[in-house]
Amino acid sequence: EKSFRIRNCKYGDLKAVSKIIFASFYNEQMRKSPFSSFLELKELDRLQSNFPYNSEKHNMFVAIETSTEDKKIIGFVDIDARPATRRIDPPRPYMSDLAVHPDYRRQGIALNLIETCETIAREQLSANEMYIRVERENYIAVQMYEKIDYKPQQHEIFGVEDTTVLLHKSLD
């Protein structure tokens, strides 16, 4: 039985979320640098400025650990279906910042967060596809996405001007 649940992210969750993102997406050298607390604050600031106040087309979700009293935040994902406005914006709906606390990985949390986003996309956004961008070097993540039918998609920027790959899934 799973010992976590998924719920909408609250503004007050973002500090814990920024720590998970920092642990997930920053390499050891950056995490141990004298600037680490500044980088973590920068992530918090980015999350706060992007927080979806009553937007129907933008959601953030957290995974909450339920086997202990403290209901610790152990995972996060952002799903955005607002219209892309810049050339560098990924296609919509788009999942980003999918991250699970290092101590809680390989327990199905990421898959549950993805399923939550896919359900929202289908049922609330009437979308029939989903996108996510992932670092090409992040083999574990790329493998996980491929297992659940995400396929690489050509893009003029992602994978061309950076080290990522854009993945696409048909939700039909």
Image (cartoon, helix red, strand yellow):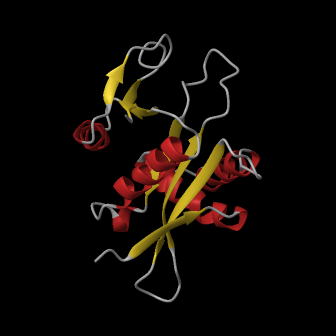
In the rendered structure, the answer to whether residue 58 lies left or right of residue 141 reads right
Question: Image height check: is 114 above or below 139?
Answer: below
Q: Residue 132, image x and y in percent?
A: 45, 34
Q: Residue 28, image x and y in percent?
A: 41, 50
Residue lying at 51% horizontally and 76% vertically, measured from the top left: 72
Q: Is residue 145 visible?
A: yes
Q: In this view, which residue lies farthest toward the bottom?
A: 69
In the rendered structure, the answer to whether residue 3 lies left or right of residue 31 reads left
Q: In this view, which residue lies farthest toward the top?
A: 156
Question: Image height check: is 37 above or below 152?
Answer: below
Q: Nearer the viewer, residue 144 or 8?
A: 8
Question: Image height check: is 123 above or below 108?
Answer: above
Q: Is residue 32 visible?
A: no
In the rendered structure, the answer to whether residue 33 lies left or right of residue 4 reads right
Q: Residue 110, image x and y in percent?
A: 38, 55
Quadrant housing the C terminus: top left
Q: Nearer the viewer, residue 115 or 104?
A: 115
Q: Residue 62, image x and y in percent?
A: 53, 62
Residue lying at 62% horizontally and 53% vertically, measured from the top left: 40
